[in-house]
Amino acid sequence: MDRGSASWWDWRLFGLWVLVNGAAFVVIPVLAILLEHLASAATHDLVHDQRALAVLIIAAVGAGTQGVILGRWQWRLLHRRVPALRRRRWVVATLVPAFFVWLAVISPDAVDILARGGDTLAAFGNGIIQALVLGPLIGLSQATALRGHTSRWAWWLAANVVTYLSGAALYELGSWLQHVLSLPGRIPAFFPVVAIAIHGAFALWVTAPAAITPSDPALSQTHVKREPAR
């Protein structure tokens, strides 16, 4: 095996992964806010009169935005190393578990904040932060999507578990620093972003050229094209 095929680290791809996932902290909450404001009156009526329906709607909006936007962005980067990975498969593998995370953990808290007249930006912002670091469920689904494309597909679940644990620890660190140093209220929410770098390193290792499954149709076609004529 040549040295090039064994190499797994790519600074450019790593930087793009951190940038794309970090951008989700800004883009997805802003889009959720816009959608919430477009239906402001209806949303606030539902929050007070039909809480269960409000929870379901917010979960659908949050998870749908996360699955379509973040899922597509991640796929564009993964597709560079795993050409046979289908976009729809990856987006669905991101959207479905994200919906259950939003429905069970994030949306109920967001509805309670909105019912009290709290900060909508904080509600959706904290929601996407939790969704990004609540990795085990999403990681299991995405790992299944990678199965058959890389021999290290199961490590994607480990990557999300490590990201979740490190993200939770960093959040607690941010909360402690906020208390000790009297930092602004929203500062702790941004500490888990550092965990994305850990996930980026895992992403490069899982999709290393040496780990790509030889039976991958796209990879096989590439080898056939490069094979010299006899």
Image (cartoon, rainbow, N blue to C red):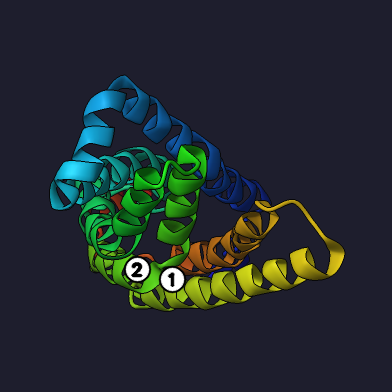
Residue 175 rendering spot, x and y as whole percentages: 68, 68
Residue 178 rendering spot, x and y as whole percentages: 76, 63
**Residue at point 64%, 74% (across, down):** 172
Q: In this view, does 18 lie above or below 1?
A: above
Residue 170 rendering spot, x and y as whole percentages: 65, 71
Residue type at mark 2 is Gly
Residue 139: which disc?
Answer: 2
For disc 1, the neighbor class at 10 Å (few under 14, some 14 to 19, many from 20) is many
**Residue at point 64%, 54% (across, down):** 190
State the residue in front, 22 or 205: 22
State the residue in front, 71 or 66: 66
Q: In this view, does 3 lie above or below 45?
A: below
Distance from label 1 to label 2 (Cα)? Answer: 5 Å
Residue type at mark 1 is Asn
**Residue at point 62%, 61% (across, down):** 197
Query: Is residue 214 visible from the viewing direction of this image?
Result: no
Pointer 1 residue:
160
State the residue in front, 126 or 28: 126
For disc 2, the neighbor class at 10 Å (few under 14, some 14 to 19, many from 20) is many
Residue 89 rendering spot, x and y as whole percentages: 20, 50
Residue 193: which disc?
Answer: none
Q: Are the two marked residues, 1 and 2, in contact with CB atoms closer than 8 angstroms?
A: yes
Q: Does dot 2 land on a helix, a strand or a loop?
A: helix
Name the side, left or right, on which 177 lies relative to 164. Answer: right
Name the N-terminal-most of marks 1 and 2. 2
**Residue at point 25%, 59% (across, down):** 216
